[in-house]
Image (cartoon, rainbow, N blue to C red):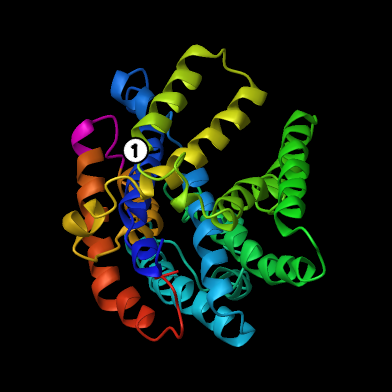
Amino acid sequence: MTEKNFRVNNFDLLRILAAVQVVVSHGFHHLHLDKSNTLFRFIEKFPGVPVFFTISGFLIAASFEKNSNLKIYFSNRVLRIFPGLWVCIFFSILTAAIVGNINFMNPVSFPWLLGQLSFMQFFNPDFLRGYGTGVLNGSLWTITVELQFYLLLPLLYFFFKKSKSVNLLLLLLFIAFFLSAILLHAFRLTETQNKFLAVTFLPHYYLFLAGMMMWKIKAYNSALINGKGLVWLAIFLLFVYAVPDSSITSFIGKILLSVFTISAAYTFPKLSRKLLKGNDLSYGIYIYHMPVINMLVEKNQISSANYFFLALFATLVLAFLSWKFVEEKFIRMKKSSLLRQ
């Protein structure tokens, strides 16, 4: 398969669907909507974060192999993540100050802000606990995890150079982190320990590695993957509905979801471009939905589907503005990038 064919895929569309799944999950929870709804329970079968992590592993590995210059690699990551994030953080601060009358002029604010703007997006100080859901933007913890993925990837490729069988080494790493994720889940940790663990790469790395593995074996060119999205969707749904739910089956289900994600990217691969016209709103949807939901919760605008759709609409508008006026402009500054990653 040529590079041109590799570039024609549905990743932008899949990321938007994953982001909307997260919005639905958080919206129903924080706005106190009916979670027994059949459609909601179906959407919950497709958790968005594992989809993001898998796509990230697939595409970041592809991008790094095209150009392994570390300066370009890290500058591209910065241009993709931070401009949109920084604008969203200041939007969150502004709305909290106006809607919630939160005073950010205190000794904790400055170090907290530095953390938000760099790599500690998960930290939420006590002075914000009284606003909205109690966390200014609870979705940003995944940014911290993604940044760890980005730091580890060049190290992996350094060791790959010394290995005679890269695919075997990658498979062994995947198995090791997959089993460690299951074991960590089984440990009886305190709430604080679980929260700390969740913002490290350890319980999530197997998903990133799953994406990397599918890139390394050129899954997009495989007869088992390419064009087989509906088949893998059927396999995934059969598994999640027919197999009794448990912690282990949950992990296995996420792996099947990872395979389905990559397969769906190369099934009717021109669909994304036809629908989105090159616009990638997924990042904006993901980072802006919680500031919007927080405003509704702060004003006690909950327990109504109308408020959820209001939140979704406002999020889409903010995501579009973020893409057009911030993200897209900085993405064009990236050098030697295989994709918009």
Which amino acid, mark 1?
A: Val
Question: Is residue 79 or residue 125 the one in the foreground?
Answer: 79
Picture coordinates of residue 182, whole percent (x, y): 73, 33
Mark yes or no: residue 31 visible.
no
Which residue is pictured at 68% across the width and 54% down the height? 201
The quarter of the image holding the N terminus is bottom left
- Main structural element of the magenta stretch: helix, strand or loop? loop
Q: Is 294 placed above or below 43 here?
A: below
Going by the image, does 339 lie left or right of 130?
A: left
Q: In this view of the protein, which residue sits in the foreground, 41 or 111?
A: 41
Q: Which residue is at a point 58% across and 79% down the rendered structure image?
A: 74
Q: Is residue 25 magenta?
A: no
The answer to whether residue 240 of the structure is visible from this angle is: yes
Q: Is residue 192 above or below residue 331?
A: above
Give the image location of residue 132, x and y in percent.
Answer: 41, 48
Q: Which residue is mark 1?
A: 24
Q: How many marks?
A: 1
In the image, residue 113 above or below residue 36: below
Q: Is residue 302 magenta?
A: yes
Occupied quadrant, residue 246: top right
Q: Position of residue 118 (x, y in %)?
A: 59, 74
Residue bounds of the magenta highlight: 300-307
User: 300 or 165: nearer the eye?
Assistant: 165
